[in-house]
Amino acid sequence: MTGTALKGLYQFGVALIVTIAFSTTSWAGLLNGHASAFGGVTGSVPFNNGLGLSGTIDYAVFSSADFNTNFGGLGYAPGGPLVYTYQVNVLGNLGVSAEVVGITNPANTIGTFDIGDVDATSASFSPNARWLFSPEIPTAMSSWGLAFSSPKLPIFGGALTVDGGTTAFVVGVPTPGPINIPEPTTLFMMGVASFAICCGTRRFRH
């Protein structure tokens, strides 16, 4: 076989592997690192209780407008200025039957949107945000997107991933904090003030 033929076969093989990888995990990691996340609040945190319940929770916070631009029509209708979104990815040998995100400040319109494998059978506040899965999310699969709205700016809090009688505590997921999202006018005035301070500082240095 010639060098050109070998090179062509190699390129075909690489393309096939990449195609298979993307087709089998088409939605995996969609929230993690999302370019439209509000204030850059996006990422992924692991969970592992040492008993077989392990995986990751991808998260991103969006403005309602940006959420609708990226996910509108996939099942969840935002009800507030910010949309908190999560996706559970199961890696251990235990499935996930519930996901609970700690809520200490107002949140509303909880639901799901279709970016994964298993939709929640119910979504409610208690006052924590809680999604139940029956059947549970099995190994190597993910939840649909989990979402709720809130008028509050994010802080980093905790969540609880559940498999029947065992749980895994997760630290570092965004939850609504005590501060309201500023009104557009307030944001504009803050921007003007920052610009004026910046210009004044430069003038003073000269």
Image (cartoon, rainbow, N blue to C red):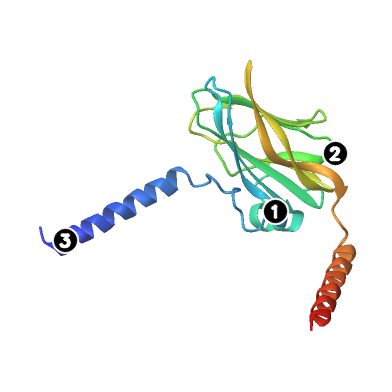
Along the viewing direction, whichever of 48 and 150 lies nearer the viewer:
48
Marks 3/2 in contact by CB < 8 Å: the verdict is no
* Residue 19 numbered mark, or none: none
The first of marks 3 and 2 along the sequence is 3
Residue type pointed to by label 1: Phe
Q: SS at mark 3?
A: helix
Along the viewing direction, whichever of 99 and 70 lies nearer the viewer:
99
Q: SS at mark 1?
A: helix
Q: Position of residue 117 (x, y in %)?
A: 54, 37
The first of marks 1 and 2 along the sequence is 1
**The N terminus lies in which quarter of the figure?**
bottom left
Residue furthest toward the bottom? 206
The first of marks 1 and 3 along the sequence is 3
Q: Which residue shows up at 89% across the image and 66% down it?
A: 185
On screen, 155 above or below 165? below
Q: Position of residue 139 (x, y in %)?
A: 49, 29
Residue type pointed to by label 2: Asn
Which residue carries the number 1 mark?
67
Which residue carries the number 2 mark?
105
- Badge nearest the viewer, 3 or 2: 2
Q: Position of residue 94 (x, y in %)?
A: 53, 22
**Distance of label 1 from label 2 (alpha carbons):** 21 Å
Which residue carries the number 3 mark?
5
Mark 2 surroundings: few (<14), some (14-19) or many (≥20) residues within 10 A: some
